[in-house]
Structure formats: structure tokens, C-alpha cells
Amino acid sequence: MENPQTQEKEAVVDWRHVFSLLLTSLFLAVVIGFSAMLLSYFLDIVADSFMHFHESYHEASPAAVPAWRRLVSVTIGGLIAGLVWYAIRRKEPKIVGINGALKGQKMPAWKTVLNVLAQIFYVGTGGSVGRELAPRQLGVMISQQVQDFGQKKGFLKLTEEDRQLLLAAAAGAGFAGVYIAPITGMLFSVELLLKKNSIKNIAISLMMSTIACLIGSLAKGFTPYYWVASADFSRWLLLAALVIGPLAGIAGALAKQGFAWAQKKQASGKVLLVTMPLVGLLTGMIAWFMPEVMGNGRAVAQLAFHQVNEELLFFFIVLGLVKFALTFLTLYGGGTGGTLTPSIALGAVLGLVVSAVFAGVLPGIQPWHFALIGAVALLAASQQAPLMAMFMVFEIAHLHSSALIIFAVAVALSSATSKFYLQVQERRSAAK
């Protein structure tokens, strides 16, 4: 029989551990928030310097920038980003990603900073890749450095579970600080990285994302990332969700496979010095006629969210395919970047295609409703993170709450469809 005194000792709260976790998370949230704010300013500086362009939800595309300047900007961007990536990859230590850090690998500080800046720089010059990976990587690196320093000096008492939590929460906070989306930042940490939604995980992640969001808003304010009309979502859109969900599930799974293959087979070594400038040049040549392909996909999605008719349907199909191809080539050519916002752009185009089928059938429904549903559904499928996808678009577009029930149906169907498709593909590959 256990001694009552022993039971009492075991029940005592380890306050040093509690304060270590709380104070570390608060400190990291503030530092990551300011880091995200600086990255936002850096993106604006690069875009203004190269194209005299300031991206906003009012003007997401550099269409007003002279075509020759767009061409020169992204070509030089590819050249410089390629040089940076070649320099930081050619020697040890190797660049470590977020998943590697969660497994205990050390992220080299200066190489990570240069990698992050190269991503933001390339997007700022017009490169076709997402910029949301950069603040997440920077957040994880900062978290790792702070934890190592604190434990080395002996004033932090953190368990291995705490270390994992602070790394994942830092990634979410980096995202929240740039996109001003605290719930999405928390869900990215808990749903996509930790895959364990305990009270502690949710509380720490949400607190860090909220603080980083408030600090990041000093640069961008609380304006929506995507501008959409303020109309409610009709219940008739549930029919659209039933159609878009499975289609987006297959398309999202294919996009996920394509991006993963491009990253796995991407150019390395001196080849990178050729491929990245060529990808930049190709992007600039296409942007001569289609400026919307430049950047992280915001321009494509924003244009789709503005549509009120189906007259430009063929244009959007071409635009979506070209955007996917350029993002694929950027990753394959040796670039590093996110795939969240490119996936939103692809989904928005898919939604518009489906809207043509429903034209004249559903009363009072606009094509941009379909674009939003497609964006959410394809994002959920490509990331295998239904809650994060649903709340990401909801938060950054400042949507009416009536959108959530429509999104929920579309996301459930797309996630299940993509999961089933990917499992079938895995079984076929294993059987060969």
C-alpha cells in the first residue's frame, strides 16, 4: 500500500515546470510576432523596389506594373534566390525543415534565416510559390534556439513533450503573425503538426498565435487578406458543396502528390544556378500576358472571388493550370516555399468551373460563392487538415458565419475523398 505522504508529493504541482512553459511561450510569441511583422515589411520593400508594387486586397495583381518590369523583376529574383539557395545548401550543416526539427534535428540559425529571406524575396519579386512556409520555419528556429539556450543555462525546465509543443506552436504563431489568423495558427500547430488536440496543446498554441497575430497586425492591420462580398451563404449552396467536395478531394490529392514529387526531385548543386533563373524568366514571360500568375496565388484567388458571371471561365481554367505549373516548376527547379495559398488559388478556379454547371439552376447564387467553397475544399484535401483549411479561409477573408456550415460539408467530403484516393494509390504502389 502506497504511503499517503508519497501520494501527496506526487500530487504537488511542479511550479518551475509550469512557469518555464508559460514564460517561454509568452516570450516566443512576442519575438515571433515581431519577426512576422518584419517579414511582412521585407516583402513590401522587395515588391516596391523591384516593381513599384504594393500588394493589398484592393490590388492583389501587379497588372498596373509595366510588363517589361515584371519580366525583369522575377528573372532577377530567380537568379538571386537561386544563388542564395545554392550557397546555403552546398555545405554542411544541411537545411532542416519543420518536420526535421520536430524529430530533434538542429536547425542551423543563419542558414535558416537566409532560407526564409530567400523565400520572401523571391515571392516579392513575383516568384510563383507560397510565402507562408517562411514565417513558420523562422518561428520554429527561434523556438529551438530559445529552448536550447534556456536549458543550457539551467533556468528552463521543459519536458520533451513541452519542447515539441513549443516548436509546433511557434510554427503556428509565425503563420498567424503574417496572415493575422490566430485560430488557423493554432489549428496548424495542433491538427497538422502535433496531431493531438489536448487542452494544453490548444491553450499554448492559441495563446502564442493570438499574441503573434496582434503584433503582426501592427504592419498589416486587421484588413482581410482576400476581399469578398458581404452576402450570406444560402443553404442552396449545400448542393454545390456536395459536388465540389469530392472533385476538390481528387484535385487536392493530385496537387499534393505533384508538389511532393517536385520537392523530392528538385534541382540541386550547380544546376540550381541555371534552373531558378530559367523558372523566373518563364514566369516573367507568362506574366507579360497574365500578371496574376505572379506571387503566392493571392492574385488568382482574389480575381476568382470577384467574379459575378461565367464569361471568363476558359481564361480561369488556363490561369489555374498555369499557376499550378509555375509553382510546380519553382519547387522542381530548386525553390523553397509554401503550397497553402497556391492550393487556395487552384481550388477557387475549380469552384468557378463547377459554378458554370449550376448557372441558372440555383437562385441568387454567385460564382464567387463556388470559388470560396472550392478554395476551402481543395486546401483541406491537399494539406489533409480539414479544420485548418476551413478556418483559414474563413479568417483571412473575414466571412459571414453562414459560410461555416457550407464549408464543413465541402471540407468533410474533400478530405475523405482525398484520403481514400491517396490510400488506394499507396496500396497500388506497395503491390508493385
Image (spheres, grey):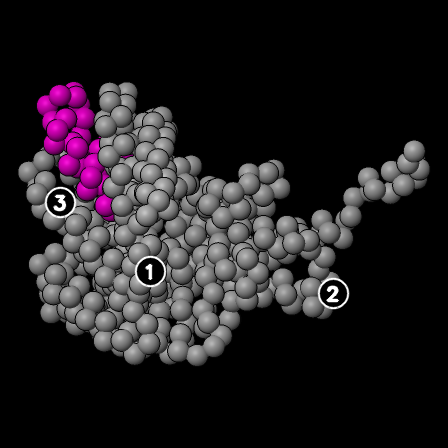
**Height in image: 386 above or below 119?**
above
* Crowd rating for badge 1 (residues with CA inside 10 Å; few <14, some 14–19, many 20+): many
Which picture quadrant has residue 8? top right
Q: Which mark is residue 38?
A: none
Three-letter code for the amino acid on which mark 2 is drawn: Gly
The residue indicated by pointer 1 is 263
Q: CA distance from mark 1 to mark 3?
A: 25 Å
Q: Does dot 1 land on a helix, a strand or a loop?
A: helix
Which picture quadrant has residue 360? top left
Is 163 covered by the magenta stretch?
A: no
Which picture quadrant has residue 86? bottom left
On the question of residue 309 being in view, the answer is yes
Three-letter code for the amino acid on which mark 1 is drawn: Gln
Q: Does dot 2 land on a helix, a strand or a loop?
A: loop
Q: First in sequence: mark 1 or mark 3?
A: 1
Give the foreground label among 1 and 3.
1
Q: Nearer the viewer, residue 36 or 388?
A: 388
Name the side, left or right, on which 18 lies relative to 374.
right
Three-letter code for the amino acid on which mark 3 is drawn: Ile
| Residue furthest left as drawn | 311
Q: Main secondary structure of the magenta part?
A: helix
The residue indicated by pointer 2 is 154
Q: Nearer the viewer, residue 382 or 212?
A: 382
